[in-house]
Image: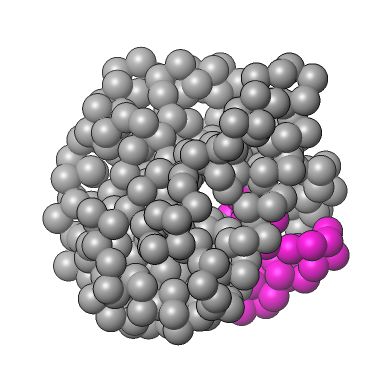
Amino acid sequence: MRPNLTEILGIEHPIIIAPMFLITNVNMVVAAIENGATAAMPALNYRSENELRQAIREIKSKSNNPFGINLIVNKSNPKYKTQLKAIIDEKVDYVITSLGNPKETINRCKPLGIKVFCDVTDVKYAKKVELLGADAVIAVNSEAGGHCGSILRKKLVTDILTHCSIPVISAGGIGTATQLCETLALGAAGVSVGTIFLAAEEAAISSEYQQALIEYGADDITLSTKLSGSHLTVINTPYVKKVGTKANFCERLMLRNKFLKKYIKYFIMYNGTRKITNAAFKSTYKTVWCAGPAIEHIKKIRPLKEILDSLNK
């Protein structure tokens, strides 16, 4: 029998508030862990190692309950080494690795009792990280907000459970208690939920972003490769329709070049990160808002506890 998320972390609800770039902040993490769930913040929310350490310490000063940090482990993240050191030094409960090889993170964290959950989008990668010693995989499906996979939730969870023996946490497409129960019934150890928590009061996003979450629905979500070089789900606003969602010819050409690829990806990611930052907290015509199809279930802005309670009915 595989342990579920409540057993792995010693929490009440098998729910991770997903690490949404710049959105999942200290207040959201504290609200989640004080109400029976857990949450993870992106390390890239913080410009310096010291700022990351201060955020971790602030959470620990408010609660003893488990929380995590999301770490980009590929070469597009020049802060990887210092962020990993901060995570280890500050004894975070778990790390969620994304977009790269988690071997070093697993090897350095596990001996210290820091659990490592690895984002995966297919069985092949799930098997690789299991062999490396991951404690669980986060199966990112085609309904996930932000960076998403290409496989439907049911198939991805079922396929990984068939071929791997470690717990599977499903990410993407969860907006209601029914969807949560359906996913757990597949055998998932828990879920990682992002989009509906964009509408939490603690998220502190712009009023325009909040209004867009309420006004747009699942049919308004589209895939873009212009912001990070990888598939990213965004709201298909008039501006997004105008500029398009695919990398331009020059970007595509350079992405095919082995030598240039990592530099171009870094540039696209840096430029896209700047746009997402501006969109989250300021509103201009040139606005790109991230969200997944679970936006369909957002009807108003509420305290995070209320949203969490709605999943646990």
Query: Does residue 228 appear anywhere in the picture?
Result: yes
Residue occupying image coordinates x 81% and y 47%: 79
Query: Which of the 4 image quarters holds residue 50?
Result: bottom right
Residue occupying image coordinates x 24% and y 56%: 218
Q: Quadrant of the C terminus?
A: bottom left
Q: Which residues are magenta?
A: 41-70
**Left or right of residue 283, residue 109 in this image:** right
Q: Compare residues 124 and 161 and report the one nearer the observer.
A: 124
Vertical side of 229 occupied by 301: above or below: below
**Relative image position of residue 143 (x, y in whole percent):** 31, 44
Q: Quadrant of the N terminus?
A: top left
Residue occupying image coordinates x 51% and y 72%: 285
Whether residue 71 appears in magenta in the rendering, the answer is no
Vertical side of 208 occupied by 13: above or below: above
Q: Compare residues 266 and 116 and report the one nearer the observer.
A: 266
Query: Which of the 4 image quarters holds residue 12?
Result: bottom left
Q: Compare residues 267 and 196 and report the one nearer the observer.
A: 267
**Left or right of residue 276, residue 245 in this image:** left
Instruction: Give the colour scheme of this rendering.
Output: one colour
Vertical side of 268 occupied by 2: above or below: above
Residue occupying image coordinates x 79% and y 62%: 47
**Relative image position of residue 310 (x, y in whole percent):** 23, 70
